[in-house]
Image (tube, rainbow, N blue to C red):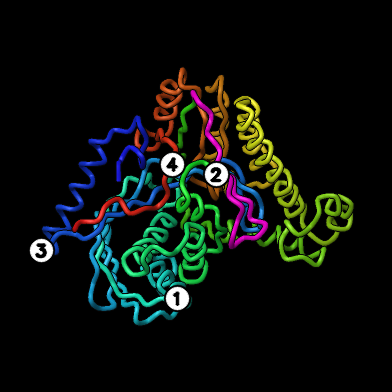
Amino acid sequence: MDLKIIYGENADINFYENRINGIEKIFLEKEGKKNEYLFSSSGRAEILGNHTDHNHGIVMVASISCDIIAAVSKNSDSIVKVCSLGYPDVIVDISDLTVKEDEFATSNALVRGVAKALTDKGYKLNGFTAYTTSNIFKGAGVSSSAAFEVLITEIFNHIYLGGIITPIERAVISQYAENVYFNKPCGLLDQSGISIGSLVKLDFLTPTSPKITKVEPPKGYSLVITNTGGDHASLTEHYAAIRREMEEVASHFGKKVLREVEYGDFLKEISILKEKFSSRAILRALHFYNENQRVLNAEKALLNNDTQAFLKQVNDSGISSIALLQNCYVPGETNQPVVLGIELSRAIIKDGAVRVHGGGFAGSILAFVNDNEVDGYVAKMQEVFGESNVFKASIRKIGTTLLKENK
């Protein structure tokens, strides 16, 4: 496949060719033979829709130019071996697909969970050997775990199933692996954005088959992601609490998720909800409804080439995440780097927008910045948060894919 189709017309193709040649050389050196296949699975940027997918909301997400590249060959047995540069080898025997608590939050769990989801659909699998290299920004909330699980799904899909799994099915299978085997109660935003590619609006009214609408990103603006610091490892309960509190509010109406509750009905019951639930749960529910509308407003703005209206929705989303969703700092912590990054960005950016990126509480923020001021913005953010923690990214048009097959 033409690498410019994957990485964009303005991409440094030599950079990507060097990465590809490097990982194929390592495969040859370690395995004593050439790899049969080469795959790519990208990171993702959450543009709008912060913590709404798990309640069947509406989101806007994009796959971006950083990725995992994997050199792969089939195995004749049931062993999956994934050797990622800089990490311990992942070795999983997929003849055993039971959930293992000691594998929670590991790559082994994701491999086993993907294999389980596929075999439950009646597909027959064998193992494979993969060597991978990644330039997905660490700690920046661009979903390296989702990129990995969607990659594993597509490897199985292509080398054993003839490519019959659709992009959305890939995402659903990957989400299952993360929910059940990795033990993280995520929604479907990350996996869908990575699997589908481009900038897309996803409506999760029917969560396993969301309605997909591709839109064009604004011209003349760069996407900048800043890792403001903090560790996500101890934050799972904070993420889970957002979903749990939204669903508690929905349960008052006899529904499972907020998307099944009309906004007007929610507003009418505020006084009763206040007696049953925390104010924070009610605020988070209000964020859900407002965020859905922001996505619709942003889609309309992009279709009308109204960049300023689009940027307003992104900025308003960032404000809502701080004030209503309350996922821009860890409760009780005085160290609040995400809020610092957002407010510093607001002080610097004259034409653009900024918001929390991904799960929140710690980690990254996302900004759209006019190309005329992006270099100054990046320099200032690097001065505060470190040169290695500020990344310019472009939106990638192709989701997780086979790059080439060596005959």
Lower position in the chain sequence, tag 1 or tag 3: 3
Q: Nearer the viewer, mark 1 or mark 3?
A: 3
Check residue 101 in the rendering and tell me which mark sits there, or answer none. 1
Q: Indicate the position of residue 128 as horizontal and vertical percent values.
A: 27, 69
x, y percent for residue 359: 55, 50
- Residue 296: where, in percent of width, then height? 68, 40
Does residue 211 belong to the magenta stretch? yes
Q: Nearer the viewer, mark 3 or mark 4?
A: 4
Q: Amino acid at mark 4?
A: Lys
User: What's the residue type where badge 3 is placed?
Assistant: Gly
How far separated are the C-alphas under marks 4 and 1?
37 Å
State the CA–CA distance, disc 1 to disc 3: 35 Å
Q: Which residues are magenta?
A: 200-220
**Which of pointers 2 and 3 lies earlier in the amino acid sequence?**
3
Q: Residues within 10 Å of mark 4 (few under 14, many from 20)?
A: some
Amino acid type at circle 2 is Val
